[in-house]
């Protein structure tokens, strides 16, 4: 079957946290000698390569950008193609050489294990061992993957904080030439390239960098789809009291500018945040049943968003279906509705030994929890798409002889998980266009995925009545993720617009100093309002 | 108490002498870091990151970019020096050294009670005079290989080791001469720089044609063609399902199939046009055909082209479209209607080279290539980076010389002459500002001093000896780094760029004056105001 390749782009530190989890989830589920082949076509997001020594590699088709100092112990070009050499052995043509060595950073237990065995033997708790995303990175990258911005330093109060700075940065040779070339190199080797997955930090300068990058992509690779995920961290580095209103205003303006540009330059964009407010302050953390996570830990929150992202994008990564990214985006993006909201149910709580039919029958409240800020998904007038993974067909219902009460339910006529979920949706949501994708394998949550599940979640992600024994770990979970487009998305955009509109001149100063005109800013806000109007019913 | 403290108690303030001390110590600090890099005998610096990434360099500009400079004054100086590099491609280290030295010299006089304003007035006079001296020293050159080789060699030897510098000198000069047309400014973008992790640094070579970083993506395509027509185009040859007719619009699989075939046929039509042209021009002759497309070519189209023995490359660099037209002739086509032979380019040899997962396509033996490629080779990444930085600077140096149509004697000769003449000029100036001129003249000597120190000689001894020589000799005198004696740079073929020196004189004087006139440093920004 023909593979339709996708190139992933990650802009910013939090995006890279999410991205790292995504790649971990995928790579931890690779089966090398299994009799049941994976339902996922990994070639969509991965590429096969060859090192100079003739070893075959399989690495993510990925380009990521981060600030200087954010890599921790990861060398910029990885160590897959070019093993590192100790400085003392470098040939310097017999000339005098002065060595300036930064302190060697210690590797955490996980990375040490990966270095030693090339695989993970034990499960470890990384909650305190993760500072940057490379600390829990499981896959190895192609040398062209990592791109570091030298001009700005990572950490603390980063100076790379406003949209126009990012746009300016794109004009430097590192991006306009080298980065653009890397995109081209990746696409050149694809036989039927279809589009881009873009994850971006929308609250800082990376939004501007992404904007310029997407402009370039639209120009050079016209008619390729772009699915974008602007993400908002649920916690900022400086503590809550010290966080000044100015910083918040800057975040809001960056977000507004990011959304406006995504509306124009992407095929579909889905804002993600584990906080419920997102704009000024991330707000109350969203709650998920049987999950307890630390909302101030990027390592935790990004894992939740990553599981949503990985599940949402499954639809066009399956072996069995021929869905394209273009169809995916066009399904939502009609009449200018370029934004959509996302929701998640993690884990999809199926009781041990229970059947899917009973589970749905007993379900109370909405199926999923929204993970788009300021957006509560309703139950009518929606265009939506659900992806459910981890419910095998044999858990659907009991066979006829011992079906008992199940026989009485009208859903008993459904013969597949897909059909039943569809049926459930048509009963519980009104005037909705539903689309369901189901995958029987669950999502892998083996280390380095954080252990955020409570004691009632069993080894396979099912819910048990009593606590799980100390020595078992959750290896995979069923999960349900949804994408929605409707009036609520309009409300979300409106709240952002209101928030941005309120910002007074002094707080815009930094944007104006960096070359954005006041007029452009208010024009962008108006466009945001126009986008909101696309969601009104008439 | 400073006024700002009333308004903002959090503001940090340094005043008058304290402010000056801050600036001077920062300038000295950055000068100390960069000192050892100057000149062909300067040391290399190896930067090793916490994760073990290695970077080796001698280039001041690269160093300044790599170092995370926190101090505001130091970063101001760093920015001025990198701006120097952006404009002229060289002279970064010199800029840092001269600014630092100007402040150091100024410090001595200010400590004795001289007002900075008077001092800067002297700097300004000295600057005008120095520019005059610079113009006097200018040696007009003809644009030919010999004279350019000297300039390029002088610049490159300060970046990489001697053996490699000599290889690169030849390559850079040949590259520029190839793409240069009379009376037109040279577009350096028309020299493509291609990296290949392979062999050793001295295997770097000039390709009179183009090297593309991709190859054909079809197993049956020829790997080598001679006597080839080159068609460059920007026309999509891949079938793309447009989004409009997605999912909802067709009812049955057959209908979908039908639409697909119709759209496919449209693309096929394009490929057939290329094939038809190839048949018309090449069949029955010994000529062959190559297509280089900026857009994509899908496997089915590649297949059609492969059957005709055509090499087809997809997703070429945008800039290579322009380069191809200059290297091989022909026009980059945006459509394939009415194709004509005159729109095609020509290359005597096109072949593919595979290195691991990387493919390279060489387009060589062009008739009069006006775009060329420097193929840089090295066994590892950090050496490649070093070569790339050096080649860029080399090309800039040559280009500067062509633009200036003149060069300046190197090896510290300019600074020594300027010192001699400024000291003479000083006496003709009335008032205290002559002290500024003296400081300025003294500061310029930092360049020959550091050159001497880096080569293992005593700074004072050398300077005294050189000044002696300079007084006796009407010709400019420079420093021979291997013997420590005086030489005539003209005879040794050591030349610097005129524009680089001019830029150094201007920017150093301005920055140093500005820093001297600072009498209060405050740290209080928008970010510390409660909003």
Image (cartoon, coloured by chain):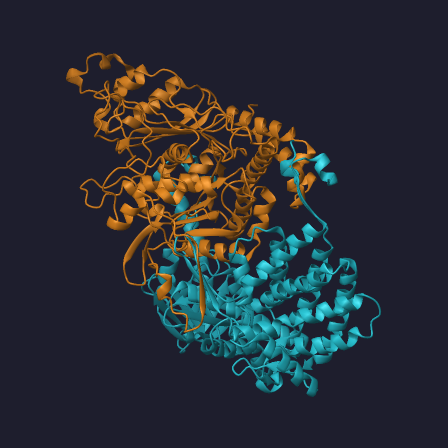
Chain colours: A orange, B cyan
Picture residue at 24% right of the left edge, 21% below the top: A467
Picture layout, residue A233 above or below residue B230: above
**Residue in the foreground of this view, choosing between A359 and A231:** A231
Q: Report x, y in % for residue A526.
A: 64, 33
Q: Report x, y in % for residue B56.
A: 45, 64
Picture residue at 21% right of the left edge, 21% below the top: A353
- For residue B336, side relative to residue B103 (left or right): left
Q: Report x, y in % for residue B152.
A: 56, 76
**Residue in the foreground of this view, choosing between B431 and B140:** B431
Picture residue at 59% right of the left edge, 36% below the top: A250
Picture layout, residue A276 above or below residue B198: above
Picture residue at 52% right of the left edge, 64% below the top: B321
Picture layout, residue B385 above or below residue A152: below
Quadrant including the C terminus of chain A: top right
Q: Report x, y in % for residue B192.
A: 51, 68
Picture layout, residue B531 above or below residue A402: below
Q: Residue furthest right?
A: B430
Res. B2 visible in picture:
yes
């Amino acid at each position: 079957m023909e593979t339709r390749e996708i190139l992933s782009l990650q802009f910013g530190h939090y995006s890279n946290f999410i991205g790292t989890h995504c790649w971990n989830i995928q790579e931890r589920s690779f089966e090398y000698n299994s009799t049941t082949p994976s339902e996922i076509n990994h070639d969509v997001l991965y590429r096969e390569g060859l090192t100079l020594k003739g070893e075959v590699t399989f690495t993510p088709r990925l380009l990521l950008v981060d600030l200087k100092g954010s890599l921790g112990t990861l060398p910029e070009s990885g160590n897959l193609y070019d093993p590192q050499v100790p400085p003392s052995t470098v040939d310097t043509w017999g000339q005098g050489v002065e060595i300036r060595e930064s302190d060697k950073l210690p590797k955490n237990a996980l990375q040490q294990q990966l270095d030693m065995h090339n695989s993970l033997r034990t499960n470890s708790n990384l909650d305190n061992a993760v500072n940057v995303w490379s600390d829990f990175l499981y896959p190895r990258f192609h040398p062209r993957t990592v791109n570091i911005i030298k001009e700005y330093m990572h950490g603390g109060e980063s100076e790379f904080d406003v949209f126009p700075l990012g746009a300016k940065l794109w004009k430097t040779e590192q991006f306009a030439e080298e980065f653009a070339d890397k995109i081209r190199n990746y696409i050149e080797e694809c036989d039927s390239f279809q589009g881009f997955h873009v994850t971006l930090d929308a609250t800082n300068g990376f939004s501007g960098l992404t904007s310029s990058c997407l402009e370039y992509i639209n120009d050079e690779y016209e008619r390729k789809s772009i699915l974008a995920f602007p993400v908002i961290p649920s916690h900022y580095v400086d503590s809550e009291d010290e966080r000044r209103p100015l910083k918040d205003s800057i975040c809001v303006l960056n977000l507004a500018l990011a959304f406006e540009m995504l509306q124009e330059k992407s095929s579909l964009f889905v804002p993600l945040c584990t906080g419920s407010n997102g704009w000024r302050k991330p707000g109350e953390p969203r709650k998920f049943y049987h999950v307890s996570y630390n909302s101030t830990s990027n390592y935790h929150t990004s894992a939740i968003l990553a599981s949503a992202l990985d599940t949402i994008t499954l639809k066009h990564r399956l072996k069995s279906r021929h869905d394209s990214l273009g169809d995916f985006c066009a399904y939502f993006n009609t009449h200018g509705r370029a934004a959509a909201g996302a929701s998640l149910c993690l884990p999809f709580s199926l009781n041990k030994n229970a059947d899917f039919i009973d589970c749905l029958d007993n379900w109370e409240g909405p199926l999923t929890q929204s993970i788009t800020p300021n957006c509560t998904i309703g139950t009518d007038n929606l265009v939506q798409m659900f992806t459910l993974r981890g419910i095998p067909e044999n858990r659907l219902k009991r066979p006829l002889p011992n079906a008992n009460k199940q026989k009485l339910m009208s859903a008993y006529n459904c013969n597949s998980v897909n059909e039943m979920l569809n049926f459930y949706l048509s009963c519980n949501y009104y005037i909705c266009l539903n689309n369901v994708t189901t995958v029987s394998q669950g999502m892998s949550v083996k280390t380095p995925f954080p252990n955020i599940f409570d004691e009632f979640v069993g080894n396979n992600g099912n819910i048990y009545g009593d606590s799980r024994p100390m020595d078992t770990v959750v290896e995979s979970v069923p999960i349900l993720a949804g994408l929605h487009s409707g009036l609520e998305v309009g409300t979300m955009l409106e709240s952002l617009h209101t928030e941005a509109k309120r910002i007074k001149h002094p707080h815009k100063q930094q944007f104006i100093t960096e070359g954005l005109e006041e007029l452009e800013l208010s024009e962008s806000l108006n466009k945001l309002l126009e986008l909101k109007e696309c969601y009104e019913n008439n | 108490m400073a006024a700002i403290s009333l308004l903002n108690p959090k503001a940090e303030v340094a005043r008058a002498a304290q402010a000056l001390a801050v600036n001077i110590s920062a300038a000295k600090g950055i000068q100390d870091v960069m000192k050892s890099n100057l000149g062909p005998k300067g040391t290399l610096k190896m930067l090793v990151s916490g994760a073990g990434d290695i970077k080796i360099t001698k280039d001041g500009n690269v160093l300044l970019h790599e170092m995370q400079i926190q101090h505001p004054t130091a970063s101001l100086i760093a920015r001025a020096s990198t701006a120097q590099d952006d404009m002229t491609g060289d002279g970064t280290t010199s800029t840092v050294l001269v600014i630092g030295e100007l402040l150091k010299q100024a410090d001595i006089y200010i400590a004795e009670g001289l007002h900075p304003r008077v001092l800067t007035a002297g700097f300004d006079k000295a600057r005008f005079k120095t520019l005059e001296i610079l113009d006097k020293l200018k040696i007009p050159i003809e644009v030919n290989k010999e004279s350019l080789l000297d300039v390029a060699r002088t610049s490159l030897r300060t970046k990489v080791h001697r053996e490699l510098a000599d290889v690169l000198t030849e390559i850079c000069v040949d590259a520029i001469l190839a793409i240069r047309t009379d009376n037109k400014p040279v577009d350096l973008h028309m020299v493509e720089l291609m990296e290949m992790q392979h062999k050793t640094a001295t295997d770097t070579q000039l390709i009179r044609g183009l090297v593309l970083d991709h190859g054909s993506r079809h197993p049956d395509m020829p790997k080598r063609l001679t006597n080839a027509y080159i068609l460059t185009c920007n026309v999509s040859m891949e079938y793309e399902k447009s989004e409009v007719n997605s999912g909802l619009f067709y009812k049955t699989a057959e209908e979908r199939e039908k639409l697909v075939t119709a759209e496919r046929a449209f693309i096929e039509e394009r490929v057939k046009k290329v094939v038809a042209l190839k048949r018309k021009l090449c069949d029955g002759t010994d000529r062959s055909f190559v297509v280089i497309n900026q857009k994509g070519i899908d496997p089915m189209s590649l297949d059609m082209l492969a059957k005709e023995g055509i090499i087809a490359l997809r997703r070429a660099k945008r800039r290579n479209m322009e380069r191809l037209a200059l290297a091989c002739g022909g026009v980059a086509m945006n459509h394939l209607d009415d194709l004509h032979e005159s729109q095609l380019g020509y290359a005597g040899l096109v072949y593919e080279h595979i290195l691991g997962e990387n493919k390279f396509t060489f387009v060589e033996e062009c008739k009069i290539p006006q775009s060329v490629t420097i193929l840089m080779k090295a066994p590892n990444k950090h050496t490649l980076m070093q070569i790339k930085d050096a080649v860029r600077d080399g090309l800039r140096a040559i280009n500067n010389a062509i633009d200036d149509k003149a060069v300046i004697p190197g090896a510290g000769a300019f600074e020594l002459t300027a010192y001699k003449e400024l000291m003479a000029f000083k006496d003709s100036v009335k008032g205290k500002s002559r002290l500024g001129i003296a400081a300025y003249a003294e500061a310029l000597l930092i360049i020959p001093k550091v050159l001497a120190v880096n080569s293992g000689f005593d700074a004072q001894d050398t300077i005294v000896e050189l000044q002696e020589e300079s007084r006796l000799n009407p010709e400019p005198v420079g420093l021979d780094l291997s013997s420590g004696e005086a030489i005539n740079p003209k005879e040794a073929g050591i030349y610097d760029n005129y524009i680089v020196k001019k830029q150094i004189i201007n920017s150093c004087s301005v920055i140093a004056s500005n820093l001297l006139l600072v009498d209060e440093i405050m740290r209080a920004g928008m970010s510390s105001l409660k909003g």
